[in-house]
Amino acid sequence: MGFIRRLLGAPGPSPDDDARSPAPDDAGLAADEQARDRELLGEDARRLGDELLQRQLRYADRSWTPPAQGGARRADDEDGGSPPG
């Protein structure tokens, strides 16, 4: 409810907010989560630090794909098209 009140701009804290104050363990969990996020971001930076990988990611949208061959109709289709020959 506090989120909706803040979103709508209601003034002052709600009585529900006092009942939901974070427990002391929540602070430790938040710190652990932040440390894990920093570790993951650091690992991503080390992994993406390779020059070749950066170049591949930079030009990935320009990759060439061969043109499609044939059509949507396949040999095992039974649509009664024109006879062969």
Image: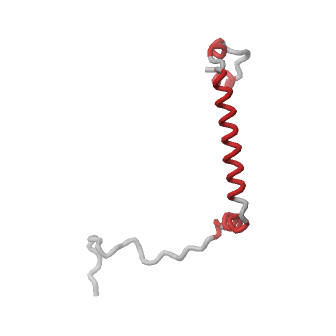
Is 10 located above or below residue 85 in the figure? above
Return the residue found at the far bottom.
85
Quadrant in which the C terminus appears: bottom left
Q: Residue furthest top?
A: 15
Give the left or right position of residue 22, taking residue 71 as reference: right
Quarter where residue 50 is shown: bottom right
The spot of residue 45 in percent (x, y) is: 72, 54
Image quadrant where residue 60 sits: bottom right
Q: How is the image coloured?
A: secondary structure
Comparing 15 with 48, the one in front is 48
- Residue 23, relative to residue 38: is it above or below? above
In this rendered view, identify the residue nearer to me: 21 or 4: 21
Which of the pair 45/25 is nearer the observer? 25
Q: Quadrant of the N terminus?
A: top right
Camera-nearest residue between 68 and 60 = 60
Q: Residue at x 31, y 76 (%)?
A: 75
Q: Position of residue 38 (x, y in %)?
A: 71, 43
Vertical relation: 32 (above or below) 11: below
Determine the residue positioned at 66% across, 21% down: 24
Instruction: Please provide percent x and percent y for residue 51.
Output: 73, 66
Q: Residue at x 64, y 26 (%)?
A: 26
Give the number of marks.
0
The residue lying at 70 percent from left, 68 percent from top is: 52
Q: From what the image shows, is residue 8 above or below residue 38?
A: above
Left or right: 73 with respect to 59?
A: left
